[in-house]
Image (spheres, grey):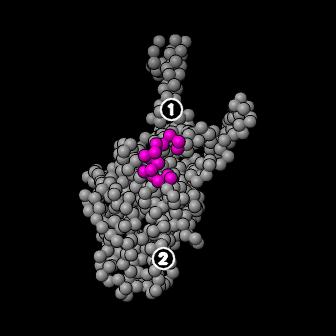
């Protein structure tokens, strides 16, 4: 008998009972091993096929998760982080630059109405608007040479989130969810915390999964409401037994439908959503219960701040930390909403002083607290914090007699902190008056490429076939930004 049941002399050997039992026994062990590997996220698929379970990166990552803070409306770089002494010297002068302003109302050069001074060991210039963030500058890496491809809020916001100015493309968080999954199967991999005051320009399209499977769409929580997710809890009057029977019956129906329509991606997405919702019934109330946070933490974030909008943003920032602690891969926190009146964003057309003072009061303390808190808890070493805005604002007034600044896509500032980032680093520069990105210009494709790199993902290899095209977050663009990375040599080797 051939123990391996291999052919002998060109003839197939007979299958003995002993060999059959040994082979099938080994097979059962392989099935069990495969299930265990999948359960631990080591087999490239999620637990029992779950799209939310962790999946391995392409190479060793520096970051395990991302918090993306979006300051919507267009933060003025020359009034926050990009100090321009030449703009002070030329205040009130006209300029020969051909400003193609959004509202076609070019005015005169206007210095920042806010005082700047140096902060930290790095001596970084920060305006008086942001005293709390000024205290954290040694943790931050600034990119002063950002530029956008649109001066319109909605397409510029889409570009910031998805790498495209058109709607319907997957958000960065959806790409990360698709590639890496979540470390907590009771919560989505991509969670969004909108500003409770107003939705962003373009609404929920900003966290769409686009052509990726619908399970990777961002899940928005309502920080300003009693329940983070409406209608999540079942009717308590039914009792646990009856609720359990209903869930079992629903599971049977879902399994029957899935078996009858094996290629129906929409049906599979709905089933996964129902399964996740059932698990979130326990996870989300616990997430939103801040009673266990001590008085020091509450004061640090400003949870009890007398300014209501500040307290709401503080809650979102604290929820972002709690989501990271629970293994959520990508958390997006929105500061500000869509354009319009009254303005609850950084869109300072009419009066840059009133507008930016109001918005800075909302954002400054909670965001600085988030960075501080992550550091104190040892989470900053594995969490990447990215702060962006869709574009900057002009160094000239909007109209000759104006007090505000118009949209400006040619130069603005963003910053990063945390895992894999070189604290105190700077990349690029705008010109002497903040009109254009003059040294090492950067686009959102480059920011996205760098974020993916820190997560252990090559932006050129993270693709999805759609309509005959291998789509990716960075389209056909994207270069790493080694100057802001803690290990620029490795970044250069990876394709900077």
Q: Earlier in the sequence, mark 1 or mark 2?
A: 1
At mark 1, the secondary structure is: helix
Q: Can residue 416 be found in the magenta stretch? A: no
> Which residue occupies the foreground of this view, 427 or 481?
427
Is disc 2 placed on a helix, strand or loop?
Answer: loop
Circle 1 residue: 39
Residue at figure coordinates x 35%, y 75% from the top left:
434
Q: Mark yes or no: residue 88 visible.
A: yes
The answer to whether residue 466 is left or right of residue 475 is right
Give the magenta range.
290-304
Residue drawn 38% across the image and 42% down it: 377
* Res 441 label: none
Dominant secondary structure, magenta: helix
The x, y position of residue 442, in whole percent, is 37, 65
Q: Which mark is residue 351?
A: 2
Is residue 319 shown above or below 413?
A: above
């Amino acid at each position: 008998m051939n123990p391996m049941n291999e052919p002998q002399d060109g003839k197939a050997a007979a299958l003995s009972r002993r060999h059959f039992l040994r082979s099938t026994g080994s097979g059962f062990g392989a099935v069990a091993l495969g299930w265990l590997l999948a359960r631990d996220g080591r087999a490239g698929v999620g637990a029992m096929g779950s799209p939310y379970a962790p999946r391995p990166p392409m190479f060793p990552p520096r970051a395990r998760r991302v918090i993306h803070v979006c300051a919507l409306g267009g933060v003025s770089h020359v009034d926050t982080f990009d100090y321009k002494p030449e703009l002070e010297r030329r205040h009130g002068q006209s300029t020969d630059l051909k400003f193609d302003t959004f509202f076609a109302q070019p005015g005169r050069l206007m210095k920042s109405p806010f005082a700047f001074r140096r902060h930290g060991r790095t001596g970084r210039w920060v305006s008086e608007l942001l005293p709390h963030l000024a205290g954290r500058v040694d943790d931050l890496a600034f990119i002063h040479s950002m530029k956008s491809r649109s001066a319109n809020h909605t397409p510029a916001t889409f570009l910031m989130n998805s790498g495209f100015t058109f709607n319907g493309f997957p958000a960065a968080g959806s790409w990360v969810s698709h590639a890496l999954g979540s470390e907590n199967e009771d919560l989505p991999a991509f969670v969004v915390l909108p500003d409770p005051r107003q939705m962003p320009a373009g609404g929920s399209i900003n966290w769409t999964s686009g052509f990726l499977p619908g399970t990777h769409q961002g899940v928005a929580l309502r920080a300003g409401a009693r329940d983070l997710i409406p209608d999540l809890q079942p009717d308590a009057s039914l009792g646990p037994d009856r609720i359990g029977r209903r869930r079992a019956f629903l599971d049977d129906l879902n399994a029957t439908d899935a078996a009858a329509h094996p290629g129906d991606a929409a049906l599979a997405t709905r089933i996964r959503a129902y399964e996740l919702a059932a698990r979130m019934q326990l996870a989300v109330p616990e997430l939103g219960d801040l009673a266990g946070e001590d008085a020091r933490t509450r004061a640090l974030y400003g949870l009890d701040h007398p300014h209501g909008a500040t307290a709401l943003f503080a809650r979102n920032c604290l929820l972002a930390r709690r989501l990271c602690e629970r293994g959520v891969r990508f958390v997006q926190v929105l500061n500000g909403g869509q354009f319009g009146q009254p303005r609850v964003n950084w869109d300072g057309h009419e009066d840059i002083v009133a507008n930016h003072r109001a918005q800075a009061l909302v954002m400054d303390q909670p965001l600085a607290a988030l960075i501080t808190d992550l550091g104190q808890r040892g989470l900053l070493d594995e969490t990447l914090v990215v702060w962006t805005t869709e574009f900057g604002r002009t160094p000239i007034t909007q109209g000759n007699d104006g007090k505000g600044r118009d949209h400006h896509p040619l130069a603005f500032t963003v910053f990063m902190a945390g895992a894999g980032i070189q604290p105190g680093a700077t990349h690029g520069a705008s010109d002497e008056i903040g009109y254009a990105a003059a040294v090492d210009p950067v686009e959102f494709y480059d920011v996205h490429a760098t974020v993916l790199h820190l997560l252990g993902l090559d932006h050129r290899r993270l693709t999805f076939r759609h309509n005959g095209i291998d789509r990716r977050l960075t389209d056909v663009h994207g270069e790493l930004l080694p100057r802001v990375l803690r290990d620029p040599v490795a970044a250069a080797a990876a394709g900077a």
